[in-house]
Image (tube, helix red, strand yellow):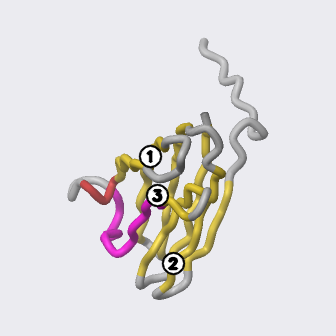
Amino acid sequence: MIQDNYSASIWPLYTVLLSDSTSVDLDVLQVGDGGSAFWFYEASRGSVRRSGFLETTWNSGGDNAELVSLSTDKYDERGVGDSTDLSIEALNVGSDIVLRATSVNSWTIKYKRLLI
């Protein structure tokens, strides 16, 4: 039998509320010497639900970040309802990497982040 040794304190759960027709910064990371971050998320709006995995990496100058997104909204046969109104992107803002969500609808977004 495999025993789960997961501890909630290793990966805290964050919850962010997104209001109608707004953008919200879900997470902000300092650039430092460069690095990578991984987010596991779930977004819900009423009976609509979407989940996904985001990964990004950036250079030490903070002038370049790349985001890869794998989520249930990319496939018609996965997810629950239409979540195409929600966009999530990684941006370079000053000396920070910002994970930003934008939508015309209200969403509740929960995520866990691993920073390397």
The reply to whether discs 1 and 3 touch (Cβ–Cβ < 8 Å) is no
Q: Residues within 10 Å of mark 2 (few under 14, many from 20)?
A: some
Q: Residue furthest right?
A: 9
Q: Residues within 10 Å of mark 1 (few under 14, many from 20)?
A: some
Q: Give the extent of the magenta segment.
A: 79-91
Q: Quadrant of the N terminus?
A: top right
Q: Position of residue 99 (x, y in %)?
A: 53, 60
- Identify residue for label 3: 90
Q: Position of residue 23 (x, y in %)?
A: 51, 78
| Magenta highlight on residue 16 | no
Query: In this orientation, which residue lies closer to the viewer: 17 or 69?
Result: 69
Query: In this orientation, which residue lies closer to the viewer: 101 or 46?
Result: 101
Residue at 31%, 59% in the rendered image: 73
- Going from N to C along the chain, the mark reached first, 3 or 2, is 2
C-alpha span from label 3 to label 2: 13 Å
Amino acid at circle 1: Phe
Rendered image: mark on residue 23: 2
Q: Quadrant of residue 115?
A: top right
Q: Nearer the viewer, mark 1 or mark 3?
A: 3
Residue at 61%, 74% in the rendered image: 17
